[in-house]
Amino acid sequence: MARIAILSYIKRNSPVHELTGTTKLIFFIAWSVASMVTYDTRVLVCMLLISAVVFKVSKIKIRDIRIVLGLAAVFLLMNNLFVYLFAPEYGVELYGSRDVLFTIAGPYTITLQQLFYHLNMTMKVICVVPVALLFIACTDPSEFAASLASIGVSYRIGYSVSLALRYIPDVQREYHNISQAQQARGIDLSGKDKLFTRLKNSVAILLPLILSSLNRIETVSNAMELRGFGKKKKRTWYARRQMKRNDWLTIGFVLTILVVDLVVTFWDGSRYFNPFV
Amino acid sequence: MTSPVISFQDYSFQYMAQAEPTLKHINLDIYPGEKVLIAGTSGSGKSTIGNCINGLIPFAYPGKSTGKLLVDGAEADKSSIFELSHTVGTVLQDTDGQFIGLTVGEDIAFAPENDCVPQEEMKQLVDKVAGLVDIDHHLEYAPQELSGGQKQRVSLAGVMVEEVKVLLFDEPLANLDPAAGRSTIELIDMVHERTGAAVLIIEHRLEDVLWRSMDRIILMNEGEIAADMPVEELLAGNLLLQHGIREPLYLTALRYAGVEICKELHPEHVDHLVLEPEDKAKVQNWYQVQKAEIRTRTHGEELLRVENLDFGYTPDKYNLQGINFTIHKGEMVSIVGRNGAGKSTMAKLICGFEKPVSGAIYMEGRNLEKDTIKERAARIGYVMQNPNQMISKPMIWDEVEMALVQSGMPKEERTKRVEETLKVCGLYAFRNWPVSALSFGQKKRVTIASILVQRPQVIILDEPTAGQDYRHYTEIMDFLKALNEKGYTILMITHDMHLMLEYTERAIVFSEGSLLADTTAAHVLNDPELVKAASLKETSLYTLSLACGIKEPQVFTECFIGYENKEVR
């Protein structure tokens, strides 16, 4: 079986792995809120440094997650591009001054303010991405549902997420097998054909894949009901781990950051740190 | 006498989507601690009986029922699937699909988790039950790291945590190789002894289940109970054959030799047969007559040659190493070996889905190295195990025509080819039908047709008969045999020893990435070492021939096959 895993749990021995799923989930949520709220460059720089350190501590290597990182980079680039195309003067509006560097064409000029705005926007994303990836790569999927349930999410939802994780490798394998067999019948997805033909061809793989996945769902839902899933409002978790000292420390730390972030950001009544005044 | 733990009283059931009832006026009592086999062809209603007992009917599959069904004294349809699950533990046939947890431990703990058992207590419980089925050293393993037999153990542990009164097995052998199947039957027997629960096994592979004794057999036919009697009585009559169930091979052999099967023979297990001297003499005579008639077929020219082939999915580990074999024109060959031995990988290499690390594959003397998947497909066809994995068009005609459309063949020629192929496959009458109207066996034919239409010289089939009852098995295999006689060369990856023995002269055995043997099917099954390495088991013909004083079990097996091919088909 070829390696086609894109993003999944990567087992290593690190302090980040040792934290419970609940801690990592809370960290991830608080961290995302903190970076979404602020446009304060000073705060963002600090957060960027911290997330770099956390990444280092986790022992996850860049090459483990390079595919997702690549995707994130493309997405970020597109995002920047579109923001500029639709609102080339947004930075000027925000920061209340206009220092033109040069003009491209028509309304499209490059201003210092716009560049600064893009810098902040990019940093916000760069702060969140590693933490989000770490949450997925360092949380044992077994603990996933338990950690969602521990912050009040219904265990049915938590379990659907964890089942999806459970079946991703199976479905990938099946996709691989089906596509090979269909290639032998002349279905080519390699890109030599026209886009429309390729779309039509991908149906030849997706249809059997969907049908077999539906079968799988029927079996597993029967198996779950036969063993009492959904009987009670609550359930216990075999794989849940006890919170340790480091968990409480981590949660304390991230909540402190969130508070500091909010205070610094809103101290002067504006979300934006303005170096141009 | 104690009261039954399960009691059907004039019970009928009709699925919502169906016009006819699937179960008709069933009267059946199962007593605590009994061991009962429910046999029948697909569509006979045997699985429906199981689903009524565990509550999937009516909770997951609604329908209309009349009469009464009592499970542990309570009326089943007034109960719930959750309450029933405390009495009846069900092991489903799909060992992969029913694995819910991400690790063995979690999967076993699934039921107690739903019951809100505290974590400490749960861990102790899991350890205890895992020890009972001997899987306690694998608690951290993920499902993909386990063999089929181990998954079966996990499934069993997962229902045993509940301390149920009835253990229900729905076709427990369907996805297992013969050796794993045998140890599953032994495991069920052991659990039965240790827990004292009633055991119900729904299965059509009779000989495999009877490896351990059963108290009685319920034979289902078209929704009714055709027989409900002790094993030896049923085996003595000819009810099994009438209802499309294969009797154990050794009994068939005895019948061929003219021995009458009666209760006194103790036909339920080959080791317990009580054969009178005149019975043995009959078998020996039959053997001498048949032996004289054994003919060996001559080989055609070389068609496919694999030479010094090495392959690994990752550079650090080889999945296949130093493989050499040659396939001749017109042969029908089995490729056997346990899961992960490299059989499917070999097929993928031949089809060009994967590229060898070193070595080469030749077809009619030409190296295939530079041929793309598409180019190879014109000469080598590959049929996947499950037809649902291949069929991608709603209509039969379109499905069969697909490969030709892709290759850009003109319409007239396409029509001619498709018509021809459909006729060969006996599907011409259905040409304008939707695929969904077909049975599993017919769908299998459609997938074979969709490959044949490209006129390949070799067809590779992955488990062509997996999960089929005897009737469908025979239907599919006779069709493949007819194709073979028309000149197609056929390679089959299989676990099915009957298939290998009855339909293929030659078997190639893979074990842990290397080719262990390349010999006759009869030889493989009569060589204890090969049998073990390939996760097969020796056939009962082997045991029977020794019991009758025949020193060459392999030749005896060949005689049996030769006789079947000549006289029976």
Image (cartoon, rainbow, N blue to C red):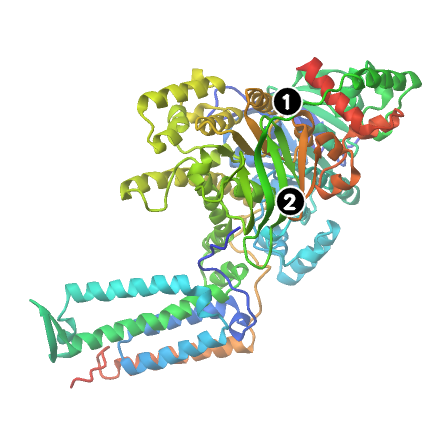
Residue hosting label 1: B26
Answer above or below: position of A110 versus A197: below
Q: CB under 8 Å between callouts 1 and 2?
A: no
SS category of the residue bearing label 1? strand
Image coords of residue A79 (percent x, y)? 25, 64
Instruction: Kindly report the distance in space between the C-alpha atoms of the residues bearing marks 1 and 2.
Output: 34 Å
In this view, the residue in front, B556 or A35, is B556
Amino acid bearing label 2: Gly
Q: Residue furthest bottom?
A: A277
SS category of the residue bearing label 2? helix
Residue hosting label 2: B148
Q: Residue furthest left?
A: A106
Q: Which comes before the other along the chain, label 1 or label 2?
A: 1
Residue at 46% across / 63% down in the picture? A136
Image coords of residue B112 (percent x, y)? 62, 53
Image coords of residue B443 (percent x, y)? 49, 27
Q: Chain of mark 2?
A: B
In this view, the residue in front, A35 or B326, is B326
